[in-house]
Amino acid sequence: MDRRKFLAATAVAAVAPSSKLDTLAQSATRQYIELRRYHLLPGTKQRSFVAFVGDVAIPAMNRAGVGRVGAFTVVYGENAPSLLLVLTHQTLDSVVSLRERLASDAVYARAGTAVLDAPMSDPPFVRVESTLLRAFDAMPTLEPSAGAGAAIPRIFELRTYESHSDRAALNKLKMFNAGEVPIFRRAGLTPIFFGETVIGGKMPSLTYMLSMPDMPARDAAWSTFGQDAEWKTLSADPQYRDNVSAISDIILQPTSYSQI
């Protein structure tokens, strides 16, 4: 180990309580999950941009150190022409420096010229909205679906829970970490990620993604979830009342190049 790093680590250990160190170590393993929603121009522009993302952008993001990238279109919900990307980052620096890393990628610049150098009079998309999440302690990393990279039919559900205050949002987060995540797995609502919103709209809030084979399987799994004995006990606990003030929900279909 580098001597300066060793001395710095020793100094922290000397002044920080062990519980504090445990918390820091645990936080370091939690991924940051970036949700990008591109609002697209219908027709040829939409098809061109979707192809650019699959053929050029996602490979470049992978080269830049971003983990698996999910790419989805909306089936039910806010269904204007759009493309939703899910990016996984190990650090905040990965989030803030991605644009610069992509800009220095010669392959990306060359292959993406038509989109990257488009004039203001002929833009490749309308706008992009971005939300940054931090994964829950109960599920600190994104888990790709079993069908990722294979031609296995599946749908995804993206749910956002808004709270009326930071205290309520933190309490809902506590409820998930207290045992809600295993109930999803047991019911057949396969989790992809759970994340608290760090930056974005509709704050304070949390967002999670689930995967199922199809809509009938989704409906049956939610019914099973609602009848689960542990869920009934957890949801009836007075300490977890009145934590969610609004819920938004969309159903997504993965693109052929989605890595999740």
Image: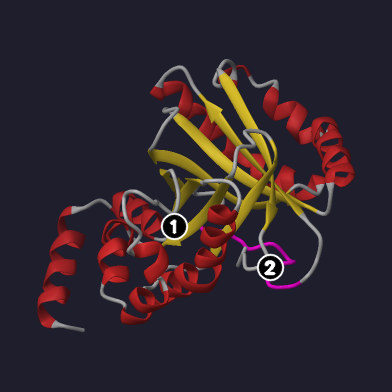
Q: Please give the residue where the numbered disc 2 appears in the rendered image.
A: 148
Numbered tag placed on residue 31 in the rendering? 1
Q: Is residue 143 magenta?
A: yes
Query: Is 44 situated above or below 181?
Result: below
Q: Position of residue 199 (x, y in %)?
A: 36, 39
Figure quadrant of the N terminus = bottom left
**Tag 1–tag 2 contact (CB < 8 Å):** no
Question: Which residue is at the front of the view, 41 or 187?
Answer: 41
Give SS at disc 2: loop
User: For the residue marked with disc 1, what is the amino acid?
Assistant: Gln
Task: In the displayed orientation, state which residue is furthest to the bottom.
Answer: 1
User: Chief secondary structure of the magenta span?
Assistant: loop
Numbered tag placed on residue 239 in the rendering? none
Q: Position of residue 62 (x, y in %)?
A: 45, 73
Q: Quadrant of residue 165?
A: top left
Going 49% across and 49% down the picture, which residue do you hit? 137
Q: Is residue 118 magenta?
A: no
What's drawn in magenta, residue-wise? 141-150
Figure quadrant of the C terminus = bottom right
Question: Which residue is at the front of the view, 97 or 12?
Answer: 97
Label 1 vs 2, first from the N-terminus: 1
Q: In screen coordinates, is 167 left or right of 174? A: left
Q: Nearer the viewer, mark 1 or mark 2?
A: 2
Q: Position of residue 247 (x, y in %)?
A: 61, 25
Numbered marks: total: 2
Give SS at disc 1: loop
For mark 1, does the 10 Å Cα neighbourhood hold few (<14), some (14 to 19), or many (20 or more) residues? many
Cα separation between marks 1 and 2: 19 Å
Type of colouring = secondary structure
User: For the residue marked with disc 2, what is the amino acid?
Assistant: Ala
